[in-house]
Image (cartoon, grey):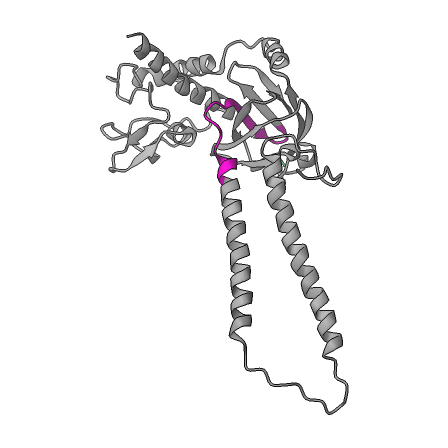
Amino acid sequence: MFPNFPLFPKQASTLAGPVDALYFFLVAITAFFSILIAVGIVFFAVKFRRRHPDEIGHPIHGSLILELTWTLIPLAIAMMIFVWGAGLYFKLITPPADATEVYVVGKRWMWKAQHLGGQREINELHVPVGQAVKLIIGSEDVIHSFYIPEFRVKMDAVPGRSTMLWFQATEAGEYHLFCAEYCGMSHSRMIGKIVVMTPPDFQTWLSGGKPSGSMAEEGEKLFTSLGCASCHLPDGTGRAPKMMGVFGSTVKLQDGSTVTADENYIRESIMTPMAKIVAGYAPLMPTFQGQVSEEQLAQIIAYIKSLNSKASATSGTN
Ligand code: CUA
C-alpha cells in the first residue's frame, strides 16, 4: 500500500501496514497544516504589510462562520484520528483465539523465551510464518520493552506483572529484536533476533530442541514439589480451590467481587496470595515470592492452563 521507503523498517507482520497507514496519515495531516500556516504567515505578512507610517488597520468584530469553521474541521479530524487509533489499538491488544503462546522473560540483559513444548532460547525467538503468535511477557528485575520494529509491535516487560503482545509474521526471515526501555548499563546490548520460518521448518526446529518436558509438565512438577498439590486437590475437597477449569473463569472472591482468572490473577495468587481470597476459603496460602523464578512462574501458569484442555478432554469422553 505504501512505498517501501528506506527510512522505514520493512513491513513484516499483518499489523505493520495498518500501523504505518495511521502514522503516515498523522504525518500528512501535520505536514498539510504546517505548510498551510507557514505559507499563510508569509502571504499575509506581505499582503497586509504597513505601507504608510500613519496607516491604521480595519477594526474586526469577529466572524461566526470563521469560528465555526476552525472549530468543526479540527474536531472532525481529531475524532477521525481517535476512532482510527482506537480501532487499531483494539486490534493490537486482541490476539486471535488460535494464537500460539510463547512465554518471554526480560532480564538484565537478555530475552529468554520458552515455548509450550518446553523448548527454550535466549535472545532469539523462532516463530512460524502466517501463524498468530501471542507472547506472555514478564520481567525478572526492571522494566524492559520487547520491540520488533519490522512487525510494528512493542510491549513493556514489567516486574510483577504479565503483559501481552501478539503478531503474525507475513514473511520468513530474520528480524531485529530490541529492548526499547533503558534498563541499565548493557541496555543497548539487550538485542536479539526473531527468526520467522515456514511451518515445516518451524516444526523441524521445534523437534530439534530436545526439551526435558513441556512447559505444562515442568509446571506440574513444580506444583508438586512446592507443595501446591497438597491443598489444591484435584477433586475440590482440599483446603484450597481446585485448579482444573480455573483459568479464564470468573472467580468469586470473599469480599463479594469477582475477577477473571487470567495470567495476572494466577501470578498474583502465587506471589501475593492474600490480595484476593477466593470466596469460601481461608487465607492460608503462603507467598512464593522469591521461591519461584519468572520462568518457573510461566511453567506453573502453563500447567494451570493445560488443566482446562484436560478438563474438556475428560468431559468429552464421558
Ligand atoms: Cu532491557 Cu533495556
Is 104 a magenta residue? yes
- Position of residue 242 in the picture relative to residue 165 (left or right): left
Q: Residue at x 48, y 28 (%)?
A: 96
Question: Quarter of the image containing the N terminus?
Answer: top right
Quarter in which the C terminus is drawn = top left
Q: Which residues are magenta?
A: 90-110
Identity of the residue drawn at 67% across and 22% down: 172
Q: Residue furthest front?
A: 65
* Residue found farthest to the bottom: 54
Residue at horizontal 68%, vertical 39%? 2
Return the x and y of residue 281 as percentages of the image width and height: 25, 27
Quarter where residue 9 is shown:
top right
Vertical placement of residue 143 versus 100, above or below: below
Is 157 left, or right, of 281 in this rendering?
right
Q: Is residue 233 visible?
A: yes
The answer to whether residue 204 is above or below residue 24 is above
Q: Position of residue 29 (x, y in %)?
A: 63, 54
Q: Position of residue 280 (x, y in %)?
A: 22, 28
Q: Is residue 190 magenta?
A: no
Residue 162, given in percent of the width and then of the height, sits at: 48, 32
